[in-house]
Image: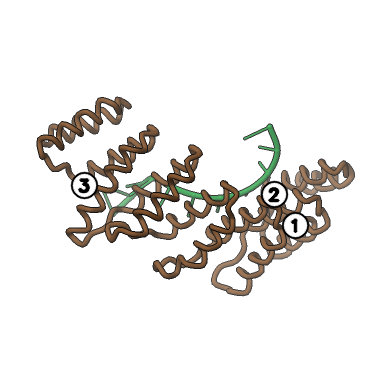
Chain colours: A brown, B green
Amino acid sequence: ESTFDLLLRSLCRVNLLDFAKKVYDYMKADRIIPDKSLLDYLVSSFSNGGRFRIAEEILIERAEMCNLKDETVSPFVYNKFLSLLISRNQVDKAVEFFRGHILKSRGFRPDNFTFNIVMRGMCVAGNVEKAYELFNVMRSFGCHPDLVTYNTLINGFCRVGNANKAQELLREIQLKCVYSPDVVTYTSVISGYCKLGKMEAAGTLFQEMIDCGIRPNLLSFNVLIDGFGKRGEINSVLKIYERMVS
RNA sequence: GCUGUUUACCG
């Protein structure tokens, strides 16, 4: 039994995933119950290798096992699964698994990361509104929006050209006073304005960020420089550059 | 016990 365990882990480590799958099937056929941590390891390995169907299958079995014992699957495992799906352009699959299993089965207990990952998936698919809906219901699952949640949404709105809504959310963070906008928050909104060619609004926010004691980083400068550059405002570009190197 | 999961620019 621990022989299978070692074998499977070794096969995964050297990326012989098809072989690992066969051994896994063999184990199941022989009704050998794999260890939980082995299952988690298999899910991660299969996910990393893009074998999402198998990973999903194991995750579902894992959740059922947990359900019987009043336990939950470690969010790390399925959060990675979800983010990999999204990074490989399979947002629909990720959302489907999230809605169909993670939110439905008691064997899963989504955390902030889970919501943030799925929301970002929706945003990259151009569906900020769906992400916004999730944002509004995550509390009912015991998850409270954090700064990354806001930053993800803000970026989603910027992506579809709604920098105003993005800025509104920035103000909302400030009003709540539980955490403050950071360099990512500001850079996102600034970038949203730059994309619209609204360089005045972008510049104002840039200054506000500095006044709030947040140091712009290389990305922040790039956003502004790119924005001014695309409008042909070379003098502004030079000014920013000067500030950057000083 | 430790490690492992999420957010910003251009390309």
Report if the CB atoms under discs 1 and 2 are less than 8 Å apart.
Answer: yes
The residue that label 1 is drawn on is A206
Q: Residue at x 87, y 41 (%)?
A: A232
Q: Residue at x 75, y 54 (%)?
A: A193
The residue that label 2 is drawn on is A220
Instruction: Give residue A101's quadrant in the image.
Output: bottom left
Report if the CB atoms under discs 2 and 3 are less than 8 Å apart.
Answer: no
Q: Is residue A18 above or below residue A246?
A: above
Label 1 or label 3, whichever lies nearer to me, is 3
Instruction: Give residue A189's quadrant in the image.
Output: bottom right
Position of A231 with respect to A209 (left or right) is right
Label located before the other in sequence (2 or 3): 3
Residue neighbourhood size for the residue with mark 2, other residues' Cα within 10 Å, grouped as few (<14), some (14–19), many (≥20)? some
Q: Position of residue A149 (x, y in %)?
A: 53, 59
Please state which of residues A216 and A223 is positioned toward the viewer in this rendering: A223
The kind of residue tagged 2 is Ser
